[in-house]
Amino acid sequence: MAESRFAELKEKERETRRQIVVESSLALFAKKPFYEVGMREVALEAGISAATIYRYFSSQEELFHEAFIQEIDTASKAFRNMLQKDEPAGMEDFGLAFVDHLIENESTFQMMTYLMLKSNLTNPVMGRFDSVTKIFFDLCEQLMVKNGAKGDSVRLYAHCFIASLAGILMTFRNSPLKNKKAVRDHIHKLVKVTSSLYTDQLISR
């Protein structure tokens, strides 16, 4: 019994230290692109040796994946709140909130793009990434239903809508417009047009 409790305590301590490493990496990602952050820098930020960090993450890639997954999981809670209001948000509100979150969190956007385009993810990482993206598909589908959408095609439209938002960001995030505000304004215009198309096609019919 005592051995079991001791093992449980050791595991909790390990998870706490592991979380400190993740939080340290996210703090660094806020300062510069995630692909420029090395394991030594993360170890220094976390207050541990470069060798010790590998007790918690076997590779830099594994650490990046965990950081991204936790970041998206936190963000999804805010989107859930949009559904729980007496009058749920519309497609446009959801779309604008989605792109604004990724505009304001550069590291999250970079990691999302990296994971979407990388072809040789390990099975555990791919499984966790799929489960995270599924959260947004589910939320978008629920939003559509709460706004009156019906039929078997709702899930398909939710996939298309989220993919459209991601595509808009990837295409125009580095648009050669005069300043960041102009870029954001242009992205907002595209999101509003896209939202109206889905609203008219699926919800208003």
Image (spheres, rainbow, N blue to C red):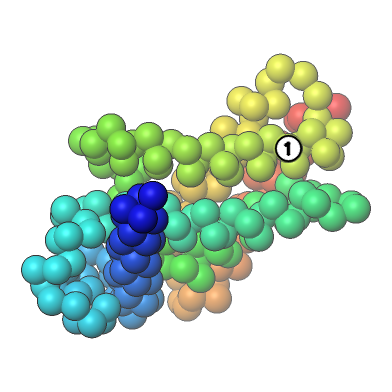
The residue wearing badge 1 is 142
Q: Quadrant of residue 185?
A: bottom right
Q: Residues within 10 Å of mark 1 (few under 14, many from 20)?
A: some
Residue 196 horizontal/vertical position (percent): 74, 44
Say if 143 sits above or below 99 in the image: above
Please say whether residue 150 is visible from this viewpoint. yes
Nearer to the camera, 70 or 12:
12
Q: Quadrant of residue 157?
A: top right
Q: Name the amino acid type tagged 1.
A: Gln
**Residue that lies at the very extreme toward the front in this rendered image:** 1
Residue 85 horizontal/vertical position (percent): 84, 55
Residue 101 horizontal/vertical position (percent): 55, 64
Q: Is residue 103 left or right of residue 93?
A: left
Say if 148 sits above or below 114 in the image: above
Label count reads 1
**Residue that lies at the very extreme toward the right in this rendered image:** 86
Nearer to the camera, 13 or 107:
13
- The C terminus: image quadrant: top right
Q: Residue at x 19, y 78 (%)?
A: 48
Say if 196 sits above or below 170 in the image: above
Q: Residue at x 47, y 78 (%)?
A: 179
